[in-house]
Amino acid sequence: MSMTTARMLLQVKGTDIWSITPNATVYEALSMMADKDVGALLVTENDALVGIISERDYARKIILLGKTSKETLVSEIMTTVLYTVHPDQTMEECMELMTNHHIRHLPIVENDQILGVISIGDVVKAIIFQQRQTIKDMEKYVTG
């Protein structure tokens, strides 16, 4: 039984990378998230990953602080402590990282190149699928 890796998940999910620059407004970031139906965007500058901005950043750092999304720049509220995974890491490793650091989105990076992003939902689905396959394999083995 082979473990699902981040690379395998990207092959199924697709490698769309939605990103925005640090000097864009939070409003522009929210508009893009709504348009692309995603909960977070990578923040890039000259192709380098410099942060991530999520709906959670917006809720906690704009609304609660009484700021407005049209006057605030992405750089002011983006998360800059970033956790990334290598494409050959397993779903279990991704889940552990997400759980330990309370994050919902993981950029997949190889040789400083961003290959894609996976969300906690993607990881949960992949693990459930993997467990179903394992159960089917065991049932086949048991019933011979």
Image: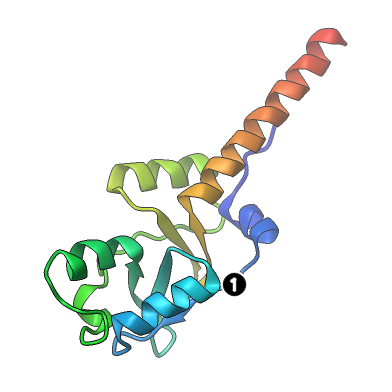
Please name the residue shown 48% across and 55% down the image: 119
* Residue 91 visible, this orientation: yes
* Residue 112 visible, this orientation: no
Seen as rendered, the residue at the extreme left is 65
Query: In the shown orientation, is residue 7 left or right of residue 135?
Result: left
Q: Position of residue 46 (x, y in %)?
A: 40, 90
Q: Position of residue 99 (x, y in %)?
A: 35, 42
Quadrant of residue 82 within the rendered picture: bottom left
Q: Position of residue 89 (x, y in %)?
A: 52, 50
Nearest to the observer: residue 77 or residue 32: 32
Vertical relation: 29 (above or below) 65:
below
Q: Position of residue 75 (x, y in %)?
A: 24, 81
Vertical relation: 12 (above or below) 3:
below
Vertical relation: 80 (above or below) 93:
below
The quadrant of the rendering that contains the N terminus is top right
- Judging by the rendered image, the residue that carries numbered circle 1 is 16
> Mark 1: few, some, or many residues within 10 Å (few <14, many ≥20)?
few
Please name the residue shown 44% across and 43% down the image: 95
Q: Amino acid at mark 1?
A: Asp
Vertical relation: 89 (above or below) 1:
below
Quadrant of residue 60 within the rendered picture: bottom left
Please name the residue shown 37% across and 46% down the image: 97
Label 1 element class: loop
